Image (tube, grey):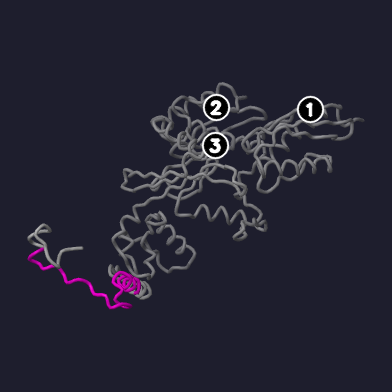
Amino acid sequence: MAKFNPGTYHEEAQGFLDMVEVDVKVSEDKIEDIQVSEADSANVGSLAIKHLVKQMLDQQTADVDVLSGATHSSEGLINAVKEALRIAAGQPEPDEFTPGTYYGEGDGYKGKVSLAVTVDENEITDIKYRGIETPELGGQASEKLIQQIKEDGSKREFDVVSGATYTTMGMQYALDRALAYARGDEDPDAEPYSFQTDTRVDFGTGWLTLDEVQAILDNLEVEISFVDKQNRFLYYNKRRHQEDAGTPRSPVTLGGNVSDCHPPQIRTKVEGIMDDLHHGRRRSESMWYTKGNGNKVYLHYRPIYDQKGRYLGVLETVQNGKPFIDTAESSWDRTLHDPHVPNPFLGETAEDVNQWYQERYEAGIDDELQHAIEKPYIEASEGGPRPDTVSKATSKAKDKEETESKDAVSGASQHEHKMPNPMPKEEIERGRDTVSGPTAPH
């Protein structure tokens, strides 16, 4: 009995940023060819798809493992090929869901949104909003969005509510997660995804795993964003307290045009900066502003290129400059600081310090629960603030520099030249026009 109905079957599934489209050619008993018309993301994604296509043809199955570092591209290809083979085999469409109630969470504009989604085998039978996100607008929008699904249980995507774009996107992400759990595509109890720790990338200046790269980026004292050559906002590091130091970021904005991540009144300026950097009319751009909480925020934009000089996109860095400004006129010795005091240079708050001490206490490291001390970091030095402290090495270098500078000007150390006598005080007071004789300046 034939395994497939011979022919070529076209299907598609969602990859990382785009749909992965496939044409699967089969004979009665064999997968003859798999053509992919969209390789989703460049570099890693396209390489992963080529590798998986070869595996599928060699093993004659779409049941292959996803590739680390290209999870979404891999899943897009696998799902598209599986669906094409199902149709080619004449198999009935399976039930979409395992009946039950599933929970999904997403990021709205300024907070979390959460949904409880109840399904039967093929439809959504109930949906409840569990988050509180921009209540004055997000709450109203959520009611309209919920009603869309209640009126049509086969609906899988919300229609965007005007004025609540990010709330809509956050709820869509939450719905997608809940339905993925209902389909069995994802395990709600699974540990967070981790890259293979034995895969190291050679950066030319050292080797790091992708886990280490992510940890480093997320612990920098600056906020980093990357916009690609098509002006798509593709990445930001998960720096804590971004709302205090810079601008809040949300995963729902990823993949969209960078101008859409900014208020309408400055979108034209943002587009102009990106265009100037892309076409070499600017080398870079820096600006700053003061937030309502008193933090002075510095923003820097610069174009970045690959090793062959090809334009990749724009790197934006954002940093709170207030800790540097507060200590600009002060100096102190290089002793350590009291760990009870939050470090403003790294964006720490009293809450961070208290959480750290709570974890130490619960782990049995500290016998008593300790708490943060609220005082300026400059006063938290174990040696105390020392405005006049300069290291001996620095002091000696400075004295030597001043001596050499004086010698270069006067030449007194090498020659017998003498400087003219200083101008008499009384002539200085009478003014330049009254000066005469040998004491007049030459």
Q: Quadrant of residue 381?
A: bottom left
- Counting residues from the start of the chain, the first of labels 3 and 1 encountered is 1
Helix, strand or loop under label 2: loop
Name the outermost residue toward the front: 437
Nearer the observer, 383 or 177 = 383
- Spatial distance from mark 2 to mark 1, Cα to Cα? 29 Å
Image-based side of 383 in relation to 140, left or right:
left
Image-based side of 435 in relation to 19, left or right:
left
Helix, strand or loop under label 1: strand
Residue 393 x, y percent position in the rendering: 38, 74
Does the stretch in magenta take in 98? no
* Cβ atoms under marks 3 and 2 closer than 8 Å: no
| Badge 2 amino acid | Phe
| Image quarter (top left, top right, bottom left or bottom right) of the C terminus | bottom left
- Spatial distance from mark 3 to mark 1, Cα to Cα? 32 Å
| Image quarter (top left, top right, bottom left or bottom right) of the N terminus | top right
Asked if residue 315 shows in the view, the reply is yes
Q: Which residues are magenta?
A: 400-427
- Spatial distance from mark 3 to mark 2, Cα to Cα? 22 Å
Q: Tell me the tag on residue 344.
A: none
The residue that disc 3 covers is 232
The residue that disc 2 covers is 158
| Badge 1 amino acid | Tyr
